[in-house]
Image (spheres, rainbow, N blue to C red):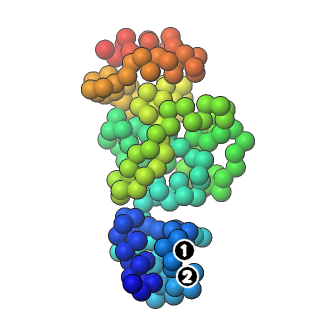
Amino acid sequence: MKQKEIVMQLLKEKNGLITSGEAREAGVSYKTIQRLHLTGDLEKLEYGLYMDPNQMEDEYYIAQHRCKECVFSHETALYFHNLSDRTPITLMMTIPSGYNTRLLVERDKYKFFYIDASLHKLGKIEVETPFGHVVATYDKERTICDCIRKKDQLDTDMVKEAIKRYMQTPGAEFAKLIEYAEIFKIKELVRNYLEVLT
C-alpha cells in the first residue's frame, strides 16, 4: 500500500483527524505528510495534527489535543450528557491548579476552572464528541456537583434544568452524587437543590 493510501485509510479509521505520531506508527514518512498538506489532501490544524479537508472541524477533540490535562466540565459536560440542549459556544474545561496551557489566552473560546490536582481526575470518564472522537469529561454526578459549586459563574436556569433532567435520568447514581458532594463539602447545598427541584 502506498503511503498516501495509508494516510487516507487512517483518516477513515480516525474520523477525519490524525496526528503525525499515528501516521509515523503506520509507516508514513514526515515528507509524505508535508506533501499531502501542500497538495491540499491534508489540512494542518496545528503542529502534529492534520485533518481531512472535507471533514468538519471537531473543536472538542482539537482543544483536548492542545491541552492534554484539560477535562471538559460544567456547561460543556452538561451538553455531553444530554443534560442541556444548548451547544456550547464557550468550551468549559477544568485543569489542575498551577497548570499552564496555551489555550488560556483564547478567552473568547475557552473558560477554565482550576481544581486541586488530587481532585482533578475524580469522576473523569471518556465520551464521544458529536464527530465521533473520544475526549475526557466528568461523569454526570461530578458535573452536577461542579455546576452547583460554580453556579454564580454559570447560567442559573441551565443548571436548574440540568439537575431536573438528571433526577429523571434512568441510572442516575444519587449515592455517588452525595459522595462527591461530601468530598467537595457541598452536601447540604446539593440536598437542598434535590429537595427543591423534586
| Circle 1 crowding by C-alpha within 10 Å: few under 14, some 14–19, many from 20 | few
Residue 21, position in %: x, y? Answer: 56, 69
- Please tell me whether residue 197 is drawn above or below residue 16 in the rendered image: above
Left or right of 171, for residue 51? right
- Quick one: label 1 or label 2, which is nearer the N terminus? 1
- Please tell me whether residue 42 is drawn above or below residue 14 in the rendered image: below
Q: In the depicted view, which residue is nearer to us: 2 or 185?
A: 2
- Dot 2: element: loop
Quadrant position of the N terminus in the picture: bottom left
The residue that appears at 53% across and 54% down in the rendered structure is 64
Residue 126, position in %: x, y? Answer: 44, 44
The single residue placed furthest to the right in the displayed view is 98
Residue 178, position in %: x, y? Answer: 47, 16
Callout 2 amino acid: Ser
Q: Which residue is mark 1?
A: 24
Disc 1 + disc 2, Cβ < 8 Å: yes
- Dot 1: element: helix
Residue 7 placement: quadrant: bottom left
The residue that appears at 65% across and 39% down in the rendered structure is 96
The residue that appears at 42% across and 16% down in the rendered structure is 175
- Please tell me whether residue 141 is drawn above or below residue 50 in the rendered image: above
Left or right of 78, for residue 96? right
Q: Which residue is mark 2?
A: 29
Residue 81 placement: quadrant: top left
Residue 63, position in %: x, y? Answer: 53, 56
Callout 1 amino acid: Arg
